Amino acid sequence: MKRNCLNCGMATFLDQKQCLKCDDMLGIQSDGSSVTVDIAHQNERVRDAVLKLENLLVELQSDNTSYLRLIVGNGLIRDEITYKLGALLHRKEILSFNQDGRNSGAILVHLK
């Protein structure tokens, strides 16, 4: 898969660390946008929600999105997603995650 350098527009591969044209570091480029996805309220089971999260993270790697806002509810899905995000943070696959303000049913994930 490919993505475009935000500095010069050159098409680059996802595994490239630096743009070949302008030498900008591709891994830290972001357009500052966020994406909101509900992974808990369409009759998902816990494993379905975790799979949705994993697929979203793969999809957003090729994008320049800064934040992923997950609607997770207040039950088992929230607990499992929090556990999964903790593991991703430990492996440095995401920068951070927190409850979205006072809404305990939403989690804001700061993507790499």
Image: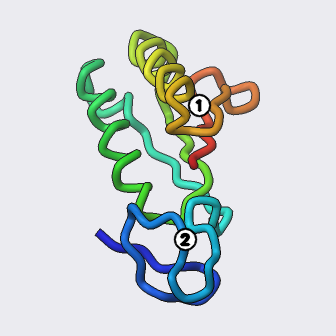
Mark found first going from the N terminus, 1 or 2: 2
Q: In the rendered structure, which amino acid carries the disc numbered 1? A: Ile
* Picture layout, residue 66 above or below residue 57: below
Q: Is residue 37 left or right of residue 29?
A: left
Frontmost residue, 108 versus 57: 57
Q: Residue at x 29, y 18 (%)?
A: 46
Residue 89: x, y in percent?
Answer: 56, 28
Q: Quadrant of residue 76?
A: top left
Label 1, residues with CA under 10 Å away: few <14, some 14-19, many ≥20 = many
Q: Give the label on residue 61, or none.
A: none
* Residue 64 x, y percent position in the rendering: 54, 65
Of marks 1 and 2, the one in the foreground: 2
Neighbour tally class for label 2: few under 14, some 14-19, many 20 plus, Cα within 10 Å: some
Counting every numbered tag in the picture gives: 2
Q: Position of residue 56 (x, y in %)?
A: 37, 47
Q: Quadrant of residue 32?
A: bottom right
Q: Nearer the viewer, residue 46 or 15?
A: 15
Q: Quick check: 53 left or right of 63?
A: left
Residue 66 in the image, given as x and y percentages of width and height: 61, 55
Residue at the extreme right of the image, as rendered: 101
Residue position for label 2: 18
| Image position of 79 with respect to 54: above or below | above
In the image, what residue occupies the spot 57% across and 60% down?
27
Quarter placement of the N terminus: bottom left
Kind of residue sitting beneath label 2? Gln
Q: Helix, strand or loop at disc 2?
A: loop
9 to 31, vertically: above or below? below
CB atoms of marks 1 and 2 within 8 Å: no
As helix, strand or loop, the secondary structure at mark 1 comes to strand
How far apart in space, not on screen, are marks 1 and 2 (Cα)? Answer: 31 Å
Q: Residue at x 62, y 79 (%)?
A: 23
Please tell me the numbered disc located at residue 107: 1
